[in-house]
Amino acid sequence: YLVDDLIGKLAVLGSGKQIGKIKSISNFGSADVIAISGEKEILCSHKKGLIVDVTGQKVVLDDKIFEEVAVYED
């Protein structure tokens, strides 16, 4: 997927839980980092299999992989 295709879309886990909107995607060399704004700011490193589906205005993320790579800001 192209970065511009993902920015602004709703990020949802496979279980159906909405976690926020994709705010930005930055590349730091070894991996892309996805910033999601919701109740808290969430940063997650892109890992193969993280994005399950991009449909309409939402991006479905794999629950297990998301929990492995997500960092929640205080």
Image: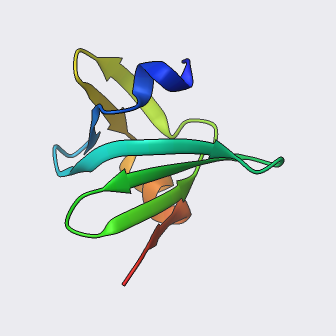
**Percent x, y of residue 67:** 44, 63
Looking at the picture, tell me which residue is in the foreground, 42 or 55.
42
Q: Name the residue rendered at 24%, 50% in the picture.
A: 20
Question: Quick check: 73 left or right of 8?
Answer: right
Please tell me in which quadrant of the rendered image residue 21 appears: top left
Q: Classify the position of the C terminus by image quarter.
A: bottom left
Camera-side residue of 51 and 3: 3
Q: Give me the residue at 50% from left, 52% from top.
A: 65
x%, y% of residue 71?
A: 48, 70
x, y percentage for residue 35?
46, 53
Q: Say which of 65 and 74 sits in front.
A: 74
List x then y, in percent, for residue 2.
56, 18
Q: Residue at x 36, y 20 (%)?
A: 54
| Residue 45 located left or right of residue 18 | right
Q: Is residue 56 left or right of residue 62?
A: left
Tell me: residue 48, above or below residue 63: above
Please tell me in which quadrant of the rendered image residue 22 appears: top left
On screen, residue 2 versus residue 52, left or right, reads right
Q: What residue is drawn where x is 63% and y is 37%?
A: 48
Q: Dividing the image into 4 quarters, which one contains the N terminus?
A: top right
Compared to residue 71, the image places residue 6 above or below, namely above
10 over 4 or under it: above or below: below
Q: Is residue 16 above or below residue 8?
A: below
